[in-house]
Image (tube, grey):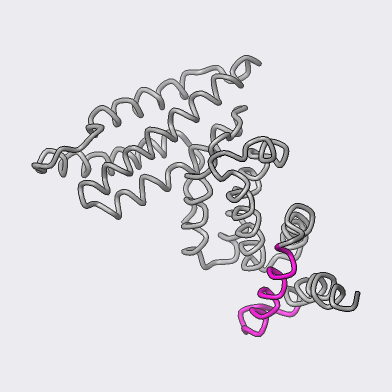
Amino acid sequence: MLPPIDISDIAEQLGGLGEDIQQAFEASTDVVEPAPPVLLEGLAQLFETMRSTHWSAPETDVIAERLLEHGLRLLTQLAGVAEQLNLPRHAQDVSQLCLPLACWMLRHGAELRHPEPIVNAAAYLANRLKEPHRLAELFELLSEIMHGIGLERTLDMERDNTEQLWSVLLLNRAIVATRSQQPRLMEDAFQAVAEHLPEAAPDFFREGMGQMASPDYPSHVREVMQRYFDLWCVGQRLH
């Protein structure tokens, strides 16, 4: 199920996860840093700030970016602590909260400068969704993330493997569009792959065409994939 893009819901989910992490921390004899209470308190204060901020003011774009960076850092640290405490499921669930947090902040003017935790969370979710309508909803979130990163910023940010993350995001977005079985989303995603990842496009459409033998894909989905396969694979071989 897709996470609601709502700060109160994120805080509620984190509350349940935080209780388990806190209990494991108190029962552990290992040295775990940063301490979960510090991280959880920081996140609680962050969510309260997000709720109380008047987002209509123009200067809040800078505030939004700083809050997003801080929130992603705290969630990543808390997920790492959960791993140290041998709570891998909790670590994954905490990491997943990066996606709704980022989308909420992007809608309030933030820019996404360190996309790795969001791209990873989206990829994890994409691998677990099955229903086409849920995948269509995820596609829209991936589009928000794509625009939140932006190609121009990607070209200026070779550090932190941003260019590679951009590629992963665009390809995963195209896979999600295909699995949503909606030609409109496929056209959008395939065009982005063709425009921004021309070197990867032939392999992507070749592999995609190989998946079309599955009965899961109706004819209208196969038609779109066939068109891009002919353009990027068959057409290129003829030149």
Residue 66, x across and y down, in percent: 51, 23
- Depth check: give the residue in front, 109 or 28: 28
> Residue at point 51% right, 45% down?
116
Q: Is residue 6 above or below residue 231?
A: above
Q: Which residues are magenta?
A: 200-219
Residue 227, x across and y down, in percent: 82, 73
Q: Is residue 13 left or right of residue 126?
A: left
> Residue at point 16% right, 44% down?
24
Q: Quadrant of the C terminus?
A: bottom right
Q: Is residue 188 above or below residue 208?
A: above
- Depth check: give the residue in front, 57 or 169: 169
> Residue at point 43% right, 20% down?
49
Q: What kind of secondary structure does the magenta stretch mostly adopt?
A: helix
Residue 132, x across and y down, in percent: 59, 66
Residue 213, x across and y down, in percent: 66, 85
Q: Residue extending furthest right?
A: 239
- Depth check: give the residue in front, 161 or 181: 161
Q: Is residue 5 left or right of residue 232?
A: left
Q: Would you identify the image quadrant in which residue 41 lies? A: top left
- Depth check: give the residue in front, 188 or 192: 192
Q: Is residue 232 left or right of residue 135?
A: right
